[in-house]
Image (cartoon, grey):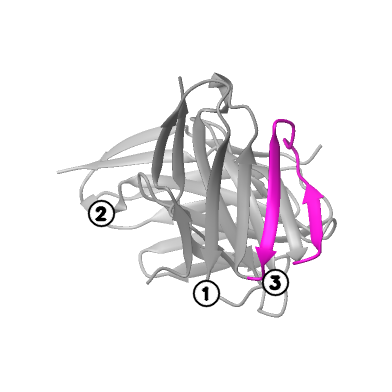
Amino acid sequence: KNQVEQSPQSLIILEGKNCTLQCNYTVSPFSNLRWYKQDTGRGPVSLTIMTFSENTKSNGRYTATLDADTKQSSLHITASQLSDSASYICVVISYNAGNMLTFGGGTRLMVKP
Amino acid sequence: DADVTQTPRNRITKTGKRIMLECSQTKGHDRMYWYRQDPGLGLRLIYYSFDVKDINKGEISDGYSVSRQAQAKFSLSLESAIPNQTALYFCATSDPQTPNYGYTFGSGTRLTVV
């Protein structure tokens, strides 16, 4: 069964600090991996999309890495801001059944002043 | 205006009642989806539709039905709501013609069944 697991489940950091969120997956066959940011009461918004051949991709202060051999990804947030407080969801797409999404449970990040 | 609009945003209903959640989109995408999100769990697929005449069951379709009234509209119905259907529901669209199948999510409908 395709699965995506994220850690930690929740994280509290001080404003200005860096943090790294982890994602492990067993989705096969792999198409691409995405990180989404979900603010409370809102729908997920895409941060990065990485294909099999991409090892790293940045979007401002967000940098995602992908190791397709070990089936692991990370999302690094640099110089955190209060507005980074949200849930971060790792999503993997497989080349089957119409390229459906498999969602991780998310990491809830709280940035405190 | 939002690309994917869900109505209502919040709804409280009683056990046994029929309820419909609506989704409309201005993206022009053929593919539409309904997901359910429970605390601490990943979004799970309820139903999806690749065009107006196409309806497919997802991972957790029991207790739900859908209607694709037009390319832009995809409705989710709970025929007889039960408390464990209390959740956050998201509609999404995607376009296989865009790089990496860009997905767009609505803002969600928070449903409470009492």
On residue A83, the disc is 2
Viewer-proximal residue, B91 or A20? B91
Classify mark 2: residues with Cα within 10 Å, few (<14), some (14-19) or many (20+). few
Q: Which residue is rendered at x = 76% and y = 44% of the image?
A: B58
Q: Is residue B46 above or below residue A95?
A: above
Marks 2 and 1: same chain? no
Q: Is residue A39 above or below residue A98?
A: above
Distance Cα–Cα, label 2 vs label 1:
28 Å
What range of the chain is rendered magenta?
A: B52-71
- x then y, percent, for residue A42: 39, 51
Q: Which residue is rendered at x = 63% and y = 58% of the image?
A: B74
Chain letter of disc 2? A
Chain letter of disc 3? B
Instruction: Check disc 1 and report the residue beneath it.
Output: B26
Task: Identify which amino acid the numbered label 2 is placed on.
Answer: Ser
The quadrant of the image that shows the N terminus of chain A is top right
Chain letter of disc 1? B
Viewer-proximal residue, B43 or A74? B43
- x then y, percent, for residue B55: 79, 55
Instruction: Check disc 3 and report the residue beneath it.
Output: B30
